[in-house]
Image (spheres, rainbow, N blue to C red):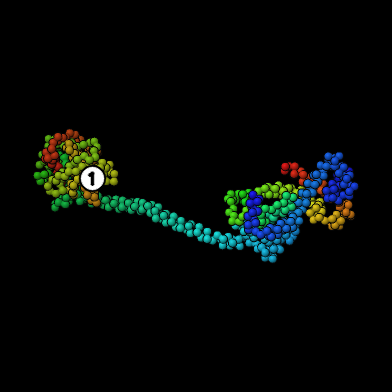
């Protein structure tokens, strides 16, 4: 029996298509032959499987037909995907969407509100402030520059005969004075006048515009040289808050003023000068700035008009520099010697001033 | 469990309607077209709503519903047939389960589908169905790989239940015996293909 006839037999047996005789024979064969029995079991399962497969396939095609028929009939309706589905979803979820949208909207508004109200405000202010500051600084600078220029002229006494005026003080007992370069600038003739009103001729022997220092020599037979100078010219730097005093000729009378060293640098961080807090007026220019030990720490030079009590003094060590420069360029005055020791260290202020005022002169330019 | 579910059914349904449903299921078991139509018309909308409201499409609804009816059909054919609740409840429960499974498979949802309709446990039936649909797939694959004319020949005989005489005429065989011979050759190949998968699968 070949495979095909065996298969046919098994199929006919399973389908009940065999005659009674055939069936008995076949059952006999199954009992005796395990392979045949196995084939029958297997084929039974397979036919079941085929049948089921067929049934489901038929069922599916019935479903398909039914679906179409029912749609036509209107028993069921199709809610198509795509646009209509979106509309369906819209109708279904519009309340939820509305709530969500309102929440989102409110949140967005709140957030952007917060952003605009809080964050950029601070930023903007800073920027504006900064800008304004820069603006102010620039304006201030221009303003101060012009003022500084003005000050340079204004501090000079507009004395009737004299075109310019200021203060100077002796740096060498033999009759050498130091003053501001701007005091004697443009002056064709310079005279100095002492406390008693004695006017003496002087000549400018050195001018340094960058240091704003001028050195004058009293060139008059009436001048009586002093033995020594009571004060010293300080070479080292000064201390902040150090009490200071000045003497000068803002008017025809010598005027005393006192204050303190308020900053180690001058206008806009100028290291040549320092800032002092003292009452100063035009005419004080070129006056000595002394500390409590009677040491000259600077030459009063300018003041800031915009601010009250802000006065700048040229550091005294620049006097040394100026003198050095002068000595290098002009060999005539090699014997100038700056006073190194103060004779007034433990003196009272009044006593100090009495001594210092002998050495402070009014400088007049013609 | 079955008792409890059925208890619920009687509370909501009349005994008459229970009898009607039993008859409907018997008719379904023998592929009765009218029964299928009835079940389809009564239950499709419910499943359609379920699927569409849970991020499915119309096509998904159709698939899931038909699959659920097939599970009901297989259950109705089995010897130990017993439906412990309404057809509607059963179809809904199965559809819900099927859809959850598909959503999880697509990793779109881990969440539960909120259900306002009564559901019954269908896990056992689902397991049985999974096994069967695996075999169905094997048969499909085997069928599609035997090629023509074997496929058409076997389908005509086993699926469309045509007689060998008809088949011989349709396929141009000189006689029914020739056609029968050819059919068996095809069947041997099909069995080989099917059992190869079946043995690998189990």
Q: Residue A339's quadrant in the figure?
A: top left
Q: Is residue A280 in sight in this rendering?
A: yes
Q: Is residue A22 shown above or below B46?
A: above
In the rendered image, the residue lying farthest to the bottom is: A73
Residue drawn at x 61%, y 55% as measured from the top left:
B118
Residue at 31% over, 51% down: A137
The answer to whether residue B57 is seen in the rendering is: no
Q: Is residue B57 or residue A249 the one in the foreground?
A: B57
Q: Which residue is drawn at 72% across and 43% down?
A: B201
The number of callouts visible is: 1
Question: Which residue matches tag 1?
Answer: A312
Q: Residue at x 72, y 53 (%)?
A: B76
Q: In this view, does B14 lie above or below A254?
A: below
Rendering coords of residue B113 (x, y %)? 59, 53
Mark 1 neighbour density, 10 Å: few (under 14) some (14–19) many (20 or more): many
The one of A285 and B197 positioned closer to us in this rendering: B197
Tell me the SS state at disc 1: strand
Residue A159 shown left or right of residue A7 in the figure: left
Q: Where is residue B170 in the image (x, y as percent from the top left)?
A: 84, 57
Tell me: residue A206, above or below residue A64: above
Residue A353 sits in which quadrant?
top left
Q: Position of residue B63 (x, y in %)?
A: 67, 55
Work out which quarter of the rendered image holds the N terminus of chain A and state it.
top right
């Amino acid at each position: 029996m070949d495979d095909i006839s065996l298969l046919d037999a098994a199929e006919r047996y399973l389908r009940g298509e065999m005659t009674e005789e055939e069936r008995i024979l076949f059952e006999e064969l199954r009992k005796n032959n395990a392979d045949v029995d196995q084939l029958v079991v297997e084929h039974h399962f397979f036919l079941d499987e085929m049948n089921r497969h067929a049934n489901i396939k038929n069922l599916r095609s019935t479903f398909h037909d039914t679906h179409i028929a029912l749609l036509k009939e209107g028993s069921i309706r199709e809610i198509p995907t795509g646009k209509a589905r979106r509309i369906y979803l819209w109708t279904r979820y519009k309340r939820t969407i509305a709530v969500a949208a309102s929440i989102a909207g409110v949140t967005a508004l709140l957030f952007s509100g917060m952003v605009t109200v809080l964050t950029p405000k601070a930023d903007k202010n800073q920027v504006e402030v900064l800008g304004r500051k820069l603006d102010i600084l620039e304006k201030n600078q221009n303003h101060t520059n012009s003022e500084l220029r003005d000050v340079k002229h204004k501090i000079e006494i507009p004395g009737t005969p004299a075109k310019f005026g200021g203060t100077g003080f002796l740096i060498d007992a033999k009759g050498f004075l130091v003053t501001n370069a701007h005091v004697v600038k443009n002056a064709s003739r310079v005279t100095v006048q002492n406390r008693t009103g004695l006017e003496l001729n002087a000549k400018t022997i050195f001018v340094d515009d960058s240091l704003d220092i001028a050195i004058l020599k009293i060139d008059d037979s009436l001048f009586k040289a002093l033995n020594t100078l009571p004060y010293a010219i300080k070479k080292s730097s000064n201390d902040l808050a150090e009490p200071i005093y000045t003497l000068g000729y803002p008017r025809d009378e010598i005027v005393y003023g006192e204050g303190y060293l308020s900053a180690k640098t001058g206008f806009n961080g100028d290291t040549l000068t320092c800032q002092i807090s003292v009452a100063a007026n035009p005419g004080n220019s070129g006056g000595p700035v002394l500390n409590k030990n009677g040491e000259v720490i600077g030459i009063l030079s300018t003041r800031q008009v915009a601010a009250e009590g802000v006065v700048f003094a040229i550091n005294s060590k620049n006097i040394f520099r100026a003198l050095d420069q002068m000595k290098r360029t002009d060999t005539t005055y090699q014997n100038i010697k700056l006073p190194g020791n103060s004779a007034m260290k433990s003196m009272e202020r009044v006593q100090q001033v009495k001594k210092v005022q002998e050495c402070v002169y009014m400088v007049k330019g013609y | 469990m079955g008792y409890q579910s059925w208890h619920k059914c009687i509370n909501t349904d009349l005994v008459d309607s229970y009898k009607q449903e039993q008859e409907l299921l018997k008719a379904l078991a023998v592929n009765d077209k009218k029964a299928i139509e009835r079940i389809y018309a009564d239950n499709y909308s419910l499943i359609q709503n379920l699927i569409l409201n849970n991020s499915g499409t119309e096509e998904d609804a159709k698939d899931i519903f038909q699959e659920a009816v097939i599970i009901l059909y297989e259950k109705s054919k089995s010897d130990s047939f017993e439906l412990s609740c309404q057809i509607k409840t059963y179809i809904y429960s199965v559809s819900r389960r099927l859809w959850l499974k598909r959503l999880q498979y697509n990793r779109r949802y881990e969440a539960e589908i909120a259900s306002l309709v009564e559901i019954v446990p269908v896990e056992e039936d689902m397991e049985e169905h999974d096994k069967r649909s695996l075999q169905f797939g094997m048969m499909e694959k085997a069928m599609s790989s035997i090629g023509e004319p074997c496929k058409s020949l076997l389908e005509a005989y086993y699926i469309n239940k045509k007689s060998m005489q008809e088949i011989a005429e349709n396929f141009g065989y000189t006689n029914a015996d020739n056609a029968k011979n050819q059919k068996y050759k095809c069947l041997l190949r099909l069995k080989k293909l099917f059992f190869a998968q079946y043995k690998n699968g189990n």
